[in-house]
Image: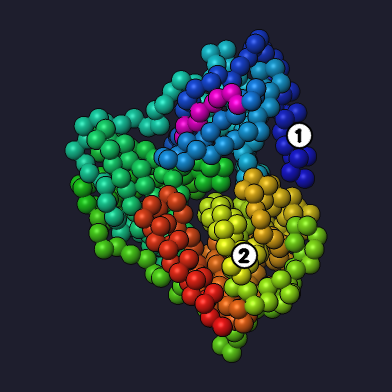
Amino acid sequence: MKKLLLIASLIAFAGATQAAPVKNAELKPGTWKGVIQRPDGEQIVFNFEVKPVNGKKVLYVLNASERLLVDDIRQQGDSLWISMPFFDAHFATVIKSNGSLEGKYIKISGERRFEIPFFALPGNKERYPISPKTKYKVAGRWDVTFGEGKDASKAVGEFQQGVNGKVTGTFLTPTGDYRYLEGGIEKDTLRLSAFDGSHVYLFKAKLDNDSTITQATFYAGGAGKEAWVANKDANAKLPDGFSAVKLRAGENKLNFRFPATTGEQIGIADDRFKNKVVVIQILGSWCPNCMDETKFLVDYYKKNKQRGVEVVGLAYERSTDFEKSKTALATFQKRLGVNYPFLVTTAAVSDPKRTEKTLPQIEPLQGFPTTIFIDKKGNVRKIHTGYDGPATGQHHEEFKKEFEGLINELLTEE
């Protein structure tokens, strides 16, 4: 289905752009400025670098220190299609006579399809305008509230600021972080954006002073919009990730069996898991934080499998159709070199009863990813919600240390 939708968009877009083709159109090497143009006038900006690798053009999406490889680029005449490696997203564009790109960003989410106008300018490293000598200092830790009233949610913002006004950082939440944000301060306005194929984000704020933000908006995709406020607070913190989900009363073991993407039926009671410390990753191919956690787990499993550690992923996809889910996960597995099984659960991520239908021994899942730690006797010892990814800096290092310490402790038990 994914391929059929992509082919349809290619045909439709090519037909709409054949009127005045540009001869010898070329995707120019170098750094570009990409702009996703929202209907409300706000622009979600990101940068990417185009370069030749082994005789073909590839690009790297740039968000702060992240370089996300995108190597599925197809050109026909002056029409250019760029498919993101994850999250069922692509760009359908035309190369204009001045070398720029113009077209649409297209995102498939289950049965829904979103299209947002997009253009990109070659030879442009600017993300947002930055005042070189801004008087505002946002570096540090912030206590943040997104939304209002009963819909409000807490977060912690952590930002770094360069002497030129450039700002990087992220927001940490109880269910994960907002990954790599980059932007800067122009006069009294802070802008931070991110694009990875799933996250299409702009955080915009009017700075009252160095410690208070009262007028700010979070823009997501083509229509999402939410107010937020923040106060600088070095002691701001979130609930412990181990406190969000627990075993139900009277339970101590899981009991599941689902088909792997290979077609094999795998259950937690199988011999492969007996007398092993098992890490169960709750994930979805649509989840950017799950991508970050998967990279970590792939490396950890490679180095520690021989010590008696097993890892298995339980995927909750947009659809309950096994073949659709398998296709989405296969791309994820191949790109990240996943070396442990991914199982496709029988519940969609949107199902409010997803936990009861698949893991009835635990309280409802609060977010993705969630990680379940099982000891050598098959008992659930810890459940952790969320993941502090590499964009969180020291928090990521602390997470890795805590993760490794817990596994080591479980391995030493008889």
Query: Which amino acid lies under the numbered mark 2 shown in the image of this protein?
Result: Gln
- Which quarter of the image is occupied by the C terminus? bottom right
Q: Position of residue 325 (x, y in %)?
A: 73, 55
Q: Which residue is label 1 attached to?
A: 7
The answer to which of 344 and 363 lies nearer the viewer is: 344
- Which quarter of the image is occupied by the N terminus? top right
**Mark 1–mark 2 CB contact (< 8 Å):** no
Query: How far apart, in angstroms, are the residues tagged by discs 1 and 2?
Result: 44 Å
Residue at (74%, 23%) from the top-left corner? 15
- Tally of numbered tags: 2
Q: Which residue is label 2 attached to?
A: 306
Q: Nearer the viewer, mark 1 or mark 2?
A: 2
Magenta segment, prevailing SS (helix, strand or loop): strand
- Of the two numbered discs 1 and 2 on the same chain, state the one appearing first in sequence: 1
Residue at (22%, 44%) from the top-left corner? 137
Residue at (52%, 35%) from the top-left corner? 61
Q: Position of residue 256 (x, y in %)?
A: 71, 74
Give the SS element for disc 2: helix
Residue at (71%, 71%) from the top-left corner? 272
Residue 365, above or below 342: below
- Which segment is the magenta one? 46-53
Along the horizontal axis of the image, is 247 left or right of 358?
A: left
The quarter holding residue 281 reads: bottom right
Give the SS element for disc 1: helix
Residue with the most extreme top position: 23
Residue with the most extreme right position: 263
